[in-house]
Image (cartoon, coloured by chain):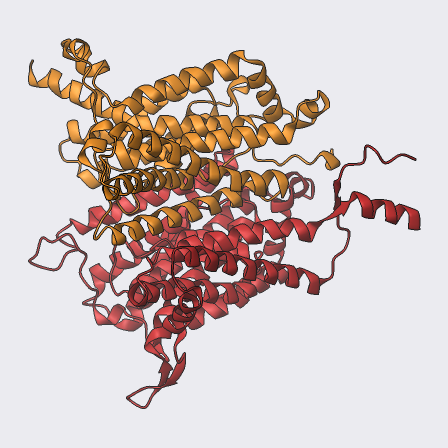
Amino acid sequence: MSYGITNILNFLNMAVLASAPLLLATLGEILTEKSGNLNLGVEGMMFMGAIASLGAAYSYEQAVTLAGGMPSPLLATLIAAGAAAAAGALGALIYAFLVVTLRANQNVTGLTLTIFGTGFANFFGELIGKQAGGFVQVSAATKAMFGNLDMGALSQIPVLGPLLFRYNWMVYFGLVAMLVMAWFLGRSRRGLNLRAVGENPATADAAGVNVARYKYMATIAGGALCGLGGMYISMSSTACAGVWVHNCVNGYGWLAVALVIFATWSPTRAWLCGLVFGGLLVVRNYYPIPGLPMQIYSMFPYIATILVLVFASIRQVKEHAQPASCGLNYFREER
Amino acid sequence: MTHAHDPFVRVVKRTNIERSKVVLFRLTALVGALLAGALLVALLGYDPAQMYGDMVSGAIKGFIGVNKKGVLAFTNASQATIKIMTLLLVSALGLTMAFKMRFWNIGGEGQILVGAICSSYVAIQFGDTWPQWLILPAMFLAGCVGGGLYGLLPAIFKARWGTNETLFTLMLNYIALNFITYLQYQPSWQITGTSFPKIRDFADSTQLPGVLGVHIGWIIALLLAVLVYLYFAKTKQGYEITVVGESANTARYAGMNVTRIILRTMFISGAICGFAGFLQVSGADGTLTTDTAGGAGFTAITVAWLAGMNPLLMIVYSFFIAILERGSNRIQTTMGIPKSAADMLIGIILFFMLGVEFFINYRLVFRARHRKEEAAA
């Protein structure tokens, strides 16, 4: 293969990998916002998922090794995923309790969750690292579970193999999550109810939908997805790959919040937009622009986000807009 | 009358609550948050009393006294705390301008950095030639204008098209940070003759004079708090901000030029944050790094919110948060507790403070009591 094609393939590969955590977090936030909760704590929940997955897998391995056994990489992976989802859900539960039950301001509560989650993750990351004698890392076998898969003959197909069949399991998990959510929001009765809650909670309430319950459920499930997005960063990304890195999430959560707007609250478009952003995050490594310093080039994803925000606000299309009640709390007594 | 379908608990809006009760509620929440933090570290096997003790002593030990040279000054421990407090207070005052208008300026970090970058540009260019009386005002002006314009940018789009300001200002943070990394690689900003990616220390003439051992910025910050308080309480512009925050439509109906108010306020908000950046490079650090803002843009949001947007209360809260931040360095060395504990603790405190607002605004009526009230009526 010529250098040009290899370079394109490598670039697309890395773009897909970089988009995976964005996709999971974006899906989580779409689900949350569909219930009318604008949770700005995505970054925090990703942080919580990132440290919880790493910490849980590490603790499991340590415990088994101490007992004289051989830790199972599969079990470690499942434990990591469970812990990540649980941690993200816990963050979302705190948010939902404050916002839905105690009627706190959504913006401030979300920001607080981000501050808390960032502190929480760095705190435990360093604490476990210190106890591990330097830094935390999971075993090579577990790391391999989060590495790229080899699907035998499929992965060997020229061009298509590397393009489609050589990613880690979380990339495919993200795709499945996207399809499930597209079906749920577009085709299921509960999805319809959820959208009604987000568009007009008073009407949904009058129709007999339990508004608070839907808000809680959607926010918590969304938080779990964000937690899994965080796990991708601490376990699968090349920057961390099973080692705790201080401040590892570093803005991904905020990009996801912006992607929700870019994707106009649609799971399928979230996948496409995620790919575009994944590409923007890594393009500088594959297509350097002569004369453009790296540090300026790395501003691209953020500049693109701003442009997206501006264009989205200029051409307001009604049917692809934010859920009408998003950001506002619903008080039955104040109808 | 049957009460079978009465809910177990009802939420009723409070019509009036005494000021003293509000203070009591908030203090209870604060104590509750500190206890929750204590519980967490206790579960991890540390002594919470020692942690809080070390934090306070590490942050304000001795506070102020006559030093070895026989001069009255803040002690070494409290000097660092006062510097953090200054940065937090000024940034919080800046952000408050926007928050009062319900403009979610999350870009304090970026505005601080751009202010710092502009001040640094003046310091790098003219630091060796201009006298101190000229360079400091020039740096001050550059910092304020730079930060102000950086705050104005998202406001223009917000006022014209309603562009989401939260994410806009947030993305500007990352752009400013990347720009500092870029500057670190520019030979004209590095130490002459080296290629190490680090911006050189500025000339002595670019540094603010000290008062009691800390750069004079801390006094300016206190004065600024009073000024911002007066701005909101006594001036027409301050009143306009509050009205726009309550309802842009009301403001329009009253004949106010909402666009102008948004643009003006965001320029001031950014300019005050830019001023904080100026204080960092001309007082606290003496150079520009990627850590110049050090998360203060975010922590300042907490300060502004905890103080309920009251500029005078922000003096108290910025001092309190500064103790936590500075004290966390201490517990890292004495007890081995990671200093990120401060961020986590700040998060817990805010959670509690957000929660307690509910009990200030509403009261719960339980079924049994509800019946009794009715019987009495």
Q: Which chain is orange?
A: A
Q: Residue furthest front?
A: A68
Residue extending furthest toward the bottom: B70
Q: Is residue B273 visible?
A: no
Between residue B43 and residue A281, name the one nearer to us: B43
**Relative to A16, does residue B171 appear above or below in the rendering?**
below
The image shows residue A94, relative to residue B21, as above or below, that is: above
- Report the residue at 20% width, 24% height from top: A148
Q: Residue at x 23, y 27 (%)?
A: A145
Could you say which is closer to the camera, residue A255 or residue B50?
Answer: B50
Q: Do we see residue B276 in this rendering?
A: yes
Q: Position of residue B214 (x, y in %)?
A: 35, 74
Q: Is residue B33 left or right of residue B182?
A: right
Q: Position of residue A224 (x, y in %)?
A: 44, 32
Q: Is residue A208 above or below residue A157?
A: below
Q: Position of residue A315 (x, y in %)?
A: 48, 23
Q: Colour of chain B?
A: red
Image quarter (top left, top right, bottom left or bottom right) of the C terminus of chain A: top right
Quadrant of the image containing the N terminus of chain A: top left
Q: Residue at x 15, y 52 (%)?
A: B197
| Rendered view: B81 above or below B124 | below
Residue B172 in percent (x, y) is at 36, 42
Residue at horizontal 34 percent and vertical 24 percent from the top:
A274
Q: Nearer the viewer, residue A329 or A293?
A: A329
Quadrant in the rendering for residue B10: top right
